[in-house]
Amino acid sequence: MNRYDVIVIGCGAGGYNTAIRASQLGLQVACVERGPDIGGAGLRTGCVPSRLLLHASALYDAGRRRKHAALGIDGPPTLDLARLMAHKTATVQKLSAQVRQRLRAQHVTLAGGHARLDGAGRVIVTSMNGAQQTLSAPAIVIATGSEPIPLAAAAFDHARILDSTDALSLDRIPRHLAIVGAGAAGVELGSLWRRLGARVTLVERRERICHWLDHEIAAALDRALRRQGIGIRLSTEVVRIDTRADGVSLALRVPQDNAPATLDADAVLIAIGRRASTAGLNLASVGMWPDRDGALPQRHASTGIWTVGDAAIGPMSMTKAEEEAIACAEQIAGLPGFVDYSSMPAVLYTSPEVATIGKTEDELRFGGVPYKVGRCALAANAHAAIHRAPEGFVKLLVDARTNLIAGAHLIGAGAAELVSQVAVAMEASMICEDFARVCHPYPAWSEALRQAAMAAGGWMMHG
């Protein structure tokens, strides 16, 4: 039996970060991965490939729409989808190899195969050829990630009925791509294929897209997507999907009037969410049972089982996975590791970008918290004018009782980078007045943050 201090099951963002940090703290670590490559869904089939393709599609779309013609940069671009996909694959493989190198540099033992718990402190690993080995450790970390949820009306066939991984590897641009679900994956992948020339229709059962966003941000994103030619059907349910040789047909129902309708497309992407991948771990052997979404509590103290990332109860993101991984490793080592979920940013890489952190206006209102709002339109920002990207705004929410920043919601170019400044301010418990007095370079996107903070205090200078 191979003995370690920590065994990590899964080598995605939650797993490899747990392993690296635990090894840095002097613990002997083994990391088990059942797939042929390491890096997890975020690196291999989610965040990294989607961001790369979104970036490429934005460049292509800007050229196709002659966005920079006024600058003397003109001419229609050409698209070689096969080369783009090959570049995506090469980038993912390079990053996966870098993770493997970091683990080896930290002296983490990598074990390939399917892991199954065998009571407290024991893991049986079965390789592809059927060989088994038993690992033992006082601490076992479950970091098995998540998987797309299929629609009850139709299972994935990965040809016409697609999951998010399929949608990042298409070998041709569909004439019409229907997307069920207008959450993060739906709007991002819809943006991607619309920019590359596909007709895209989002079908969402709720009354608005990205329902967790601040209502003003969600409305602004809805308008932007519609202007880009993306069809959006809200308050609409998919009751059946029929496949045929040349496409799919979605049977729809609008609950308000129960009116039936159909939507024909080349393919349909199901983007209704993800569920934790915890099946097959033999959790019963340690007295653990997942919730209805497959997720587990972050700690099962009596058995030494820990859970991080998408497998743990809570939001699913690489950001959360890394934070929980660091805290988990530190707690196992006896240090006071912690995660501050209240200042954890989230980003949608649509065009315009969307970033959010902290409370929304609705949450503050429903919680009875008095608050102030500071807004700055990017149209007033010099950097936005230079980049010909005036769309969007920054919205800062400030607790009126303490003058602390309660949340921030941004839509527009640069939002993904700007939200990090707000995260630093919230972690440092910086009051709005101090945030407004932080000096920024000129011209820069970040000036919009300062102006929004000034606006919350009633003294906006430029807006």
Image: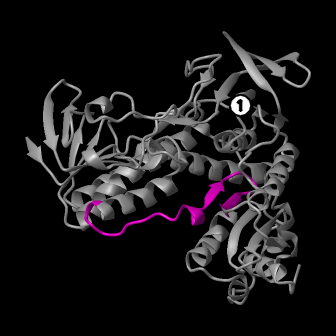
Q: Does residue 62 belong to the magenta stretch?
A: no
Quarter of the image holding residue 406? bottom right
* Coordinates of residue 376 in the picture (x, y in percent): 83, 73
* Quadrant in which the N terminus appears: top left
Q: Residue furthest left?
A: 1
Residue 344 within the magenta-colored segment of the rendering: yes
**Residue located 68% across and 48% down the image:** 57
Who is closer to the viewer here, 295 or 230? 295
Whole-percent x and y of residue 362? 78, 56
Rendering coords of residue 64 (x, y %) = 78, 48
Q: Amino acid at mark 1?
A: Ile
Q: Is residue 344 left or right of residue 447?
A: left
Q: Quadrant of residue 196?
A: top right
Q: Which residue is mark 1?
A: 179
Q: Which stretch is magenta?
A: 332-357
Q: What residue is drawn where x is 60% and y is 80%? A: 429
Residue 98 visible in image: no
